[in-house]
Amino acid sequence: MNTVEIKNLTKKFGSTVAIDNLSLNIEKGKITGLIGADGAGKTTLLRTIIGLLFPNDGEINVLGFNPATEKDKLLEGYTKDGIMHLPLGYMPQKFGLYEDLTVIENLKLYADLKGVAHDFDRMLEFTTLAPFQDRLAGALSGGMKQKLGLACTLLGNPEFLLLDEPSVGVDPISRRDLMKMVREMISPETTVLWSTAYLDEAHSFDTAVVIDRGKIIFNGSPHDLAPTPQEFENKVIDLMGGYNKEESLIAKNYDYKAPNVELTVEADNLEKRYGNFYAVKNNTFKIKKGEIFGLLGPNGAGKSTSFKMMCGLARPTSGTARIMGIDIKKNPERARANLGYMAQKFSLYGSLTVRENLDFFALAYGISILKKEEKVNEVIDVFGLKEYENTKAEELPLGLKQRLSMAAALIHNPPVLFLDEPTSGVDVLTRRDFWNHITSLAKKGVTIMVTTHFMDEAEYCDRISLFYKGETIAVGTPTELKQQAGANDMETTFINLIKESERGKS
Ligand SMILES: Nc1ncnc2c1ncn2[C@@H]1O[C@H](COP(=O)(O)OP(=O)(O)OP(=O)(O)O)[C@@H](O)[C@H]1O
Ligand SMILES: [Mg+2]
């Protein structure tokens, strides 16, 4: 039985063909993974399936209805075995939480809106959000928001669950939780369509569908394509046309004044408190010129808060940071001039086009008018933004937003780069591209502080600081940390060290 049947579907936006004569069946009771390059058409496909977008051509049938003309049928709840069910549960990429309501208020409000009753305690336990149930949703870390969004989507026991990259920005432990949450909270008849950039995740699903430029290039069992997650990733990369292994042009053309200090970034007893809660607790670390320093840690560990304090966007409760020896508290502007910061949350101008945003940042960072155009053209080219240069930033697919943010962060060639989850929501090819730029820049002497939830990426760091509950619980090279944790890979290292710290506290 199929939950979805699609025949020769085409969806265009102006002259852009987002879905190109695509045919696909999605089997009932199975988890199907949707994979594809940034802008490949994943979100468009999901939105067409639930009737948010209307196709230009082709047929589409969802749970026996045509979502374009019978959408109301797909929204009507019904009772089965005494349990209220909704036909659809859709979690968009940016789930609309009420930021000025608390965690529990969001859950209750969504349950009311959907007209369903639910066991909130179980939801809170599953999401590990119970201790934070009275915190405003707006004050949650990125990953905590994703968990709450998923919990709200699961309310009403949907028959067909559509998740648009739910694990973006979710830490490795919580990603397992999300998967568990979905697998345990749905019934065996529930169909799931799960879009993801994590290929290890997709490898664990029943079916994987890879789309490229609106067409399906693979549809089948991930295990048939490759036995291990790593092999699966490589195969998918090949299918998608391979990635750029050449020298990073960004690094090649990066002309900057090499720092004359050895320690370029220092956090000095840095602390941030909200009421009685310590988001960051007495944190000290030093980063050397040309080092790639990774901040790893579960959601809510205090990574973004550290970034924000260290670039002068949040005032530390106590302690300070120095960038190239300049105190961020005493001389915020001078310190910041040495920095390129890519925030976790998209922070560019949504209503400006890609080119206008880059023009703006080039000028704001003091690049001369004469050089501006050359510089902007260069980053547009290197980050593959040419075909989107006149698109408004807010209309970009997530992965392209990330490319634009990265481009804006380094357009003025600063000696220090702060990258807060640069690869979250980015496709597998672009992730490798990003790291090619990052490692090449570091070789040129640029200092990089970076966070990631992709444990394979942690291996590219020279040193890692593992953060947990606002504190550093381990620092060292990837090899040292693995030894300390008695593990062979970073994911196990991460999990073991967190568990160990947890045991030490109790
Ligand atoms: N304004 C605020 N009021 C209360 N708590 C806050 C506020 N801002 C952040 N926090 C809390 O501080 C903690 C650290 O958040 P932070 O965003 O630094 O985490 P993170 O390590 O970046 O997590 P993620 O991996 O999810 O991005 C979280 O528990 C968060 O809810
Ligand atoms: Mg963060």
Image (spheres, grey):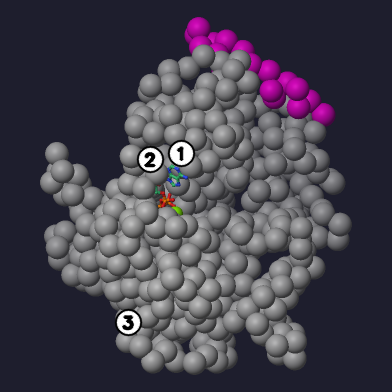
Q: Is residue 201 magenta?
A: no
In three-dimensional space, the C-alpha distance between marks 1 and 2, rounded to whole angstroms, equals 24 Å
Q: In this view, does 174 lie above or below 115?
A: below
Quadrant of the snapshot with the C terminus:
top left
Residue indicated by mark 1: 147
Which residue position is annotated with label 2? 275
Circle 1 Cα neighbour tier, 10 Å, few/some/many (<14 / 14–19 / ≥20): many
Residue appearing at x 41%, y 26% in the figure: 123
Mark 2 Cβ inside 8 Å of ligand 1: yes
From which residue to which does the magenta span run? 69-85
Left or right of 483, for residue 20: right
The foreground one among 447 and 202 is 447
Looking at numbered disc 2 in the image, what kind of residue is underneath it?
Gly
Question: The residue tagged with tag 1: helix, strand or loop?
Answer: helix
Along the line of sight, the residue nearer the viewer: 332 or 168: 332
Query: Closer to the N terminus: mark 1 or mark 3?
Result: 1
Question: On the image, numbered disc 3 is attached to which residue?
Answer: 263
Query: Horizontal and vertical percent for residue 93?
Result: 60, 46
Classify mark 3 as within 8 Å of ligand 1 or not, answering yes or no: no
Say if the magenta span includes residue 76.
Answer: yes
Residue nearest the viewer, comparing 486 with 378: 378
Q: Is residue 74 left or right of residue 33?
A: right
